[in-house]
Amino acid sequence: MNLYHLYGLIFLFINLNVFGQNQEDKIYNAIDVFVANPSAEALQNLAKEETDFWKNPKPKTKEELLAIVVLN
């Protein structure tokens, strides 16, 4: 395997990790942003994440439900 293939694989895994966020990660990120900088905009973002969570028809995992409990 040459170096270009290795770079390609590393790039692929980084992209999958960054863009493959699940609902749990999105909720915790919104909470972290609000705690770091409480503002009306961050509060609206929290409300949006909760609304998006309940609108998502996908079955909820225990971890995702725990994230909602932490949010509330």
Image (cartoon, rainbow, N blue to C red):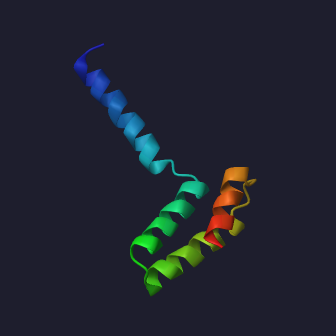
**Count of numbered circles on the image:** 0
Q: Quadrant of the C terminus?
A: bottom right
Q: Is residue 61 visible?
A: no
Measured from the top left, where is residue 57 in percent x and y?
74, 60
Looking at this view, name the residue that lies furthest to the top.
1
Q: Can residue 49 be seen in this view?
A: yes
Closest to the observer: 66 or 13?
Answer: 66
Quadrant in the rendering for residue 15 = top left
Task: Specify whether 65 is left or right of 38.
Answer: right
Closest to the observer: 10 or 70?
Answer: 70
Say which residue appears at 72% left-offset and 55% top-offset.
Answer: 58
Quadrant in the rendering for residue 8 = top left
Measured from the top left, where is residue 38 in percent x and y?
43, 80
Q: Quadrant of the N terminus?
A: top left
Task: Specify whether 60 is left or right of 9.
Answer: right
Say which residue appears at 46% left-offset and 86% top-offset.
Answer: 40
Measured from the top left, where is residue 5 in percent x and y?
30, 22
Say which residue appears at 73% left-offset and 51% top-offset.
Answer: 62
Closest to the observer: 57 or 29?
Answer: 29
Looking at this view, name the residue that lies furthest to the left.
3
Quadrant in the rendering for residue 13 = top left
Closest to the observer: 29 or 1?
Answer: 29
Task: Specify whether 60 is left or right of 33.
Answer: right
Say which residue appears at 46% left-offset and 66% top-offset.
Answer: 32
Q: In the rendered view, would you say 27 is above or below 8?
A: below
Measured from the top left, where is residue 51 in percent x and y?
65, 73
Q: In the rendered view, would you say 56 is above or below 47?
A: above
Q: In the rendered view, would you say 3 is above or below 43?
A: above
